[in-house]
Image: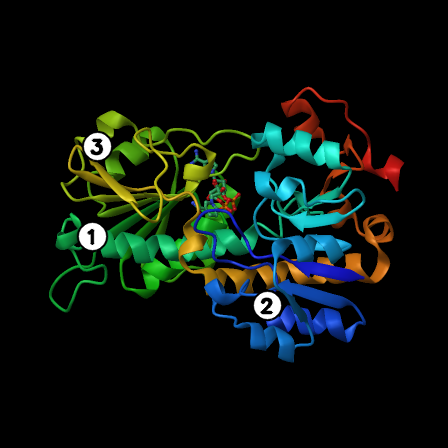
């Protein structure tokens, strides 16, 4: 198959959808890989690395879209890319269709085959192509929390791990899923006194079994959260209720009870946030202060570490890309139920229920098109 990897053109997006190692795997299987020149530079992959891996470089985005049977990307196509997409072309990338009506209509109109990373789903209902970014954001949340706890950044002025004779900082993590677990591991490793809250007792039991002794678990409810926010130096929001907005678990009135310079990191900002005072920020201007409490609410945290994120993403997406390239999208989706769930729009038809419902569009069973 002829595979194209364009440079991402969305503002501040430095990731690329394929590493040189990924390109080598596809080339080894007899596929042709075309990468846009300079596409990997933001992730620290120079063109020469792709060339040594057997890929060919093309100078413009038009060339890449023009030649490819399958485009592998990171972010959803944006308006300047719409006209480059051809009927029948496979697009394998994050789409988040349900929050983009214009994007959905554009992909219906162009007749492409849209396989969305975010809806590829394993039988246990986990989302294997979202997990790597949650891992990055979870680990990063502690790094950011520790940084903004420093006085010069407006924090309370506490070192996360303390020193001999001085107790460590207290870190509260609300939500013990992927983000929360990775955050807890990092905070515990730095020596903080960590509490994870979740509503799932099963999850709390598991976390209690695997976490080191400086991590405690606690049931998430308003009473416990209200008491805990008074004493914690960093509070990380990591809840997810699939398909719904995040609940506001830390309310505005609780801010007055926190220590001045407490740092709130709301990783769940992309689902509306689990703090009432959350509003999305960017890497260029990541924080704001309300009632002496510092808020960090960057919606695309992995964007700050594009090299790690690119490699983590490719590790997860490549096995499916290989299946699509080896067998063609139809056979790959017949053989793999997880991949079939990634189909969102096929040849002008919406085949993912949530997207059809979001925009009141006719829904077609994906299997009827295979
Ligand atoms: N900002 C970013 O850059 C970024 C990056 C990756 C993920 N995220 C977001 O982080 C959030 C968490 O993702 P995840 O992969 O860890 O999800 P997950 O499904 O693995 O975990 C969510 C956890 O929240 C728990 N939960 C639900 N309601 C709760 C409540 N009331 N109190 C406490 N816990 C509750 C669930 O039981 C579950 O364990 C999502 O909103 C995701 O979109 C943001």
**Residue underneath mark 2:** 19
Front residue of 240 and 94: 94
From what the image shows, is residue 22 above or below residue 120?
below
For the N terminus, the image quarter is bottom right
| Real-space Cα separation, disc 2 to disc 1, in angstroms | 35 Å
- Residue most extreme to the bottom: 52
**Residue underneath mark 3:** 255
For image coordinates 74% across by 37% down, the residue present is 110
**Mark 3 or 2, nearer chain start:** 2
For image coordinates 20% across by 52% down, the residue present is 149
Which disc is residue 149 wearing?
A: 1
Number of residues whose C-alpha sits closer than 10 Å to that of mark 3, classed few (under 14), some (14–19) or many (20 or more): many
Mark 2 or mark 1, whichever is nearer to me:
2
Residue 288 in which image quadrant: top left
Number of residues whose C-alpha sits closer than 10 Å to that of mark 1, classed few (under 14), some (14–19) or many (20 or more): many
Label 3, secondary structure: give it: helix
| Real-space Cα separation, disc 3 to disc 2, in angstroms | 43 Å
For image coordinates 68% across by 19% down, the residue present is 360
Front residue of 31 and 293: 31
The response on whether ligand 1 sits within 8 Å of label 3 is no
Residue 174 image point, x, y percent: 38, 42
Residue 251 falls left or right of residue 133: left
From what the image shows, is residue 210 above or below residue 277?
below
Residue 240 image point, x, y percent: 49, 38
Label 1, secondary structure: give it: loop
Residue 128 image point, x, y percent: 62, 52
Residue 148 falls left or right of residue 366: left
Q: Is residue 343 visible?
A: yes
| Real-space Cα separation, disc 3 to disc 1, in angstroms | 16 Å
Residues at circles 3 and 1 in contact by the CB criterion of under 8 Å? no
Mark 3 or mark 1, whichever is nearer to me:
1
Number of residues whose C-alpha sits closer than 10 Å to that of mark 2, classed few (under 14), some (14–19) or many (20 or more): many
């Amino acid at each position: 198959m002829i595979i194209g990897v364009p440079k991402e053109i969305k503002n501040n997006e430095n990731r690329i959808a394929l590493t040189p190692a990924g390109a080598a795997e596809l080339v080894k299987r007899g596929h042709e890989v075309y990468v846009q020149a300079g596409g990997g530079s933001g992730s620290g992959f120079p063109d020469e690395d792709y060339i040594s891996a057997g890929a060919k470089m093309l100078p413009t985005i038009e060339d890449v879209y023009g030649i490819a049977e399958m485009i592998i990307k990171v972010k959803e196509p944006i308006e300047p890319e719409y006209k480059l997409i051809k009927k029948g072309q496979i697009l394998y990338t994050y789409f988040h269709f349900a929050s983009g009506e214009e994007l959905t209509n554009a992909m219906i109109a162009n007749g492409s085959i849209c396989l969305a990373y975010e809806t590829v789903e394993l039988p246990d209902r986990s989302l294997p192509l979202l997990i790597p970014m949650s891992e990055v954001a979870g680990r990063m949340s502690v790094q950011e929390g520790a940084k903004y706890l420093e006085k010069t950044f407006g924090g309370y002025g506490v070192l996360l791990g303390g020193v001999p004779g001085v107790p460590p900082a207290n870190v509260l993590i609300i939500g013990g899923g992927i983000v929360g677990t990775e955050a807890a591991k990092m905070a515990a490793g730095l020596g903080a006194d960590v509490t994870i809250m979740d509503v799932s007792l099963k999850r709390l039991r598991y976390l209690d079994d695997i976490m080191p002794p400086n991590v405690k678990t606690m049931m998430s409810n308003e009473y416990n959260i209200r008491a805990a926010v008074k004493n914690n130096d960093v509070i990380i929001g990591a809840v997810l209720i699939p398909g719904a907005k995040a609940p506001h678990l830390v309310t505005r009135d609780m801010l007055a009870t926190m220590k001045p310079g407490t740092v709130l990191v709301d990783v769940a900002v992309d689902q509306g946030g689990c703090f009432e005072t959350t509003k999305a920020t960017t890497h260029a201007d990541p924080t704001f202060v309300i009632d002496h409490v510092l808020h960090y609410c960057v919606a695309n945290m992995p964007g700050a570490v594009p090299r790690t994120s690119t490699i983590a993403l490719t590790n997860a997406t490549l096995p499916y890309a290989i299946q699509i390239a080896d067998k063609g999208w139809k056979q790959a989706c017949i053989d793999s139920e997880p991949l079939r769930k990634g189909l969102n729009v096929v040849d002008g038809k919406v085949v993912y229920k949530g997207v059809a419902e979001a925009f009141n569009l006719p829904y077609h069973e994906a299997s009827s098109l295979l």
